[in-house]
Image (spheres, grey):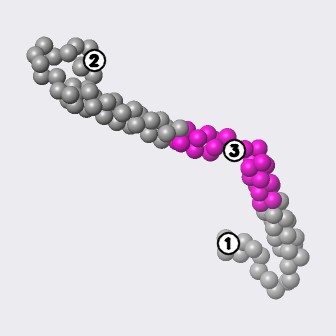
């Protein structure tokens, strides 16, 4: 294929066919479409990366609320476990009986 050199210099002999320009435009259009798709994939990858590293404020607030709920739940469970072990019945074994 002659793709780009045809515009720089025409062949010295009379070998220039009528469909050479169509072949050149096909190659140019294919390359343009390829680079356009490459750009689309790059843009999609960049947006995915951006959303995962910097979530929207309302999503970040939901994530912080979920974390705070888990922390308070865990603290309450630990406090209940400690209070229940302090009020254990005399026949119950201590929680760390297996350590000795």
Separation of disc 3 and disc 1 at Cα? 49 Å
Which residue is under mark 3?
A: 55
Separation of disc 3 and disc 2 at Cα? 49 Å
Q: In this view, does 76 lie above or below 34?
A: below
Separation of disc 2 and disc 1 at Cα? 90 Å
Q: Give me the residue at 31% from left, 34% from top.
A: 26
User: Is label 2 in a helix, a strand or a loop?
Assistant: helix
N-terminal of the pair, mark 2 or mark 1, is: 2
Tag 3 and tag 2, C-beta contact below 8 Å: no
Q: Can residue 37 be seen in this view?
A: yes
Taking depth in this image into account, of 15 and 98 the one nearest to the observer is: 15
Q: Give me the residue at 67% from left, 75% from top.
A: 98
Q: In which quarter of the image is the C terminus?
A: bottom right
Q: What's the mark number on residue 100?
A: 1
- Residue 57, by quadrant, is top right
Q: Give me the residue at 58% from left, 41% from top.
A: 47
Magenta span of residues: 44-70
Q: What's the mark number on residue 7?
A: 2
Outermost residue toward the left?
13
**Badge 2: how crowded within 10 Å, few (<14), some, or many (20+)?**
few
């Amino acid at each position: 294929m002659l793709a780009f050199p045809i515009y720089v210099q025409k062949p010295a002999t009379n070998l220039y066919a009528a469909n050479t320009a169509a072949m050149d435009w096909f190659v140019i259009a294919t390359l343009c479409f390829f680079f356009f798709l490459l750009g689309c994939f790059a843009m999609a990858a960049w947006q995915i990366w951006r959303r995962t590293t910097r979530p929207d404020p309302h999503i970040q607030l939901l994530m912080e609320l979920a974390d705070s709920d888990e922390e308070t739940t865990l603290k309450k469970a630990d406090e209940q476990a400690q209070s229940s072990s302090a009020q254990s019945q005399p026949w119950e074994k201590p929680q760390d009986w297996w350590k000795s």
